[in-house]
Amino acid sequence: MSKKFKVELDEALCKGQACAICQNACPQKVFAISDQPTPQGIWTLRVANPEECTGCRRCELFCPELAITVALIGKEAPEPAVPLPASVAVTPDYGGWAEVPSALPAGVHFLSGNEACAEGTLTAGCRFYGGYPITPSSELMVHMAHRLPEVGGTFIQMEDEIASLCAVIGASWSGIKSMTATSGPGFSLMMESLGYAVMTETPCVIVNVQRAGPSTGQASRPAQGDVMQARWGTHGGPEIIALAPWSVQEMYDLTIRAFNLAERFRVPVIVLADEIVGHLQETITVEPTVRCFNRTRWPQDSPFGTEADDGVPPMPAFGEGARLLITGSTHDARGIRRTTDPQTQERLVRRLANKLLAHRNEIDDWETYFTADAERLVVAYGSVARSALWAVQEARRRGQRVGLLRLKSLWPFPDEIVTRCADDCREVVVPEMNLGQVVREVERCTAARVTPLSQTNGEIIDPRRILGYLLEGRW
């Protein structure tokens, strides 16, 4: 007696004539176009000749929406479509924190910021770099090209920045920590892929060594003009993490932290450096070991759904046994497209945002100087904070009660600490190498007078200019 099979097709998932893979793949012509469209105007496929099915399961394997199930009649459950050989059996790896050896020997090293960033990347466990050369981040790429093969990693120079971030996302889904580096024009090209990484919850790191713009601007001059682009450049308004180092030491330390945050929350993380910090040369101290977080892994078929309180689902990798469907469209816990379901869209977007907003205590990062008695507060970040610190120290020597709040993380914006530090101040001063970006966030956080000190001439803000304002009100 020949075997008989039951073929089921979920028309709510079927993309119909726009796909028709099952119809083309089936040698027995089991599938046909429906007699009438859905209320959304889609001519879906239907099971027209189920008695002709031979159980080859090509339709089930090839359907990009996982809309088809083929079951042997008389069995309680279908036989596996693709039995996994024993060689790919996976032992669950729950990830988490671990002490790992530093990529550099412990001790003091003299490096540029870009080189220190690359070494931090290697220490964090990154083993894939896909990038395209662009000043002032090129030294980072060159350093990775030399060092990655030495630690068993892979370096690829892509044809442009669009392909670079796409390659990084693909490498991450193979289970490898991955990153790229760029500057303003290249960062602009990455925006669509950045949104895709957010939607697919892909951990990766993007280093943006900012330079003067707009457009190609001044290729090797400093600026801080990409702050708002990092937060709002990709459409849909997702939450994002962005860190702002002010020294070569922090190019090393915050890069490691960026990977930890990316892996912890399954998100892309931006290291928002600038040309001054990227090309600065200083000594850094490297510890023998560092704490690194490895993503929680499990070969499950629902990589976008979780009942955990933190909202971060485990992340399987391709080749570990899970049937993965990775789409930038609205999707359910299994990755199946639900583009017309308002509840799925609302639930997904809220979870993507809340998994960061609910853990601000793990993300927000800052330092304060002389804020206990401050009547005026300077808020600064990146290399400008170095100028601001000198100016604050000098102003205090001259009797001014001034303090400094240095923001080490910019997104999500640390509004609570800004409010707390500014509450008792009569003025908040925000020096920036742009026309005023963080100053607008500061204005939301305090009733005090907020004064922008903006400079866009492609030069570092001279600390004496900040001091001049603090002492004499001139800028």
Image (spheres, rainbow, N blue to C red):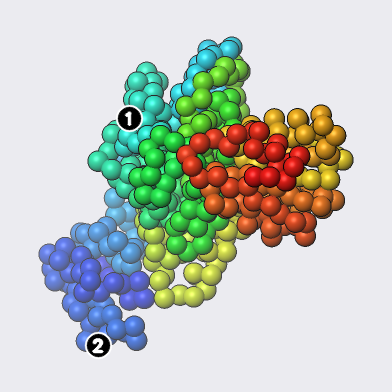
Q: Which residue is drawn at the image coordinates 82% and 50% (left, top)?
A: 425
Looking at the rendered image, the quarter that the C terminus falls into is top right
Residue bearing the label numbered 2? 36
In-image side of 187 versus 440 (left or right):
left
Residue labelled with disc 1: 155
Q: Would you say 97 lies left or right of 46 here?
A: right
- How far from the left and from the top, in percent, is residue 156? 29, 33
Q: Nearer the viewer, residue 318 or 283?
A: 283
Separation (CA) of disc 1 from disc 2: 51 Å
Judging depth in this view, the residue of 193 and 65 nearest the camera is: 193
Between residues 433 and 118, which one lies in front from this camera angle? 433
Establish if 448 lies above or below 474.
below
- 113 or 237: nearer the viewer: 113
Across and down, in percent, residue 62 comes to 25, 59
In the image, farthest residue toward the right: 373
Image quarter of residue 24: bottom left
Q: Mark yes or no: residue 160 visible.
A: yes
Q: Nearer the viewer, mark 1 or mark 2?
A: 1
Q: Amino acid at mark 1?
A: Phe
Looking at numbered disc 2 in the image, what kind of residue is underneath it?
Answer: Gln
Q: Is residue 440 above or below residue 186?
A: below
- Locate residue 202, reporting x and y percent: 45, 48
Q: Taking 209 as reference, is 291 left or right?
A: right
Near mark 1 (Cα within 10 A), the count class, few <14, some 14-19 or many ≥20, is some
Residue for point 21% across, 74% down: 17
Quadrant, the N terminus: bottom left
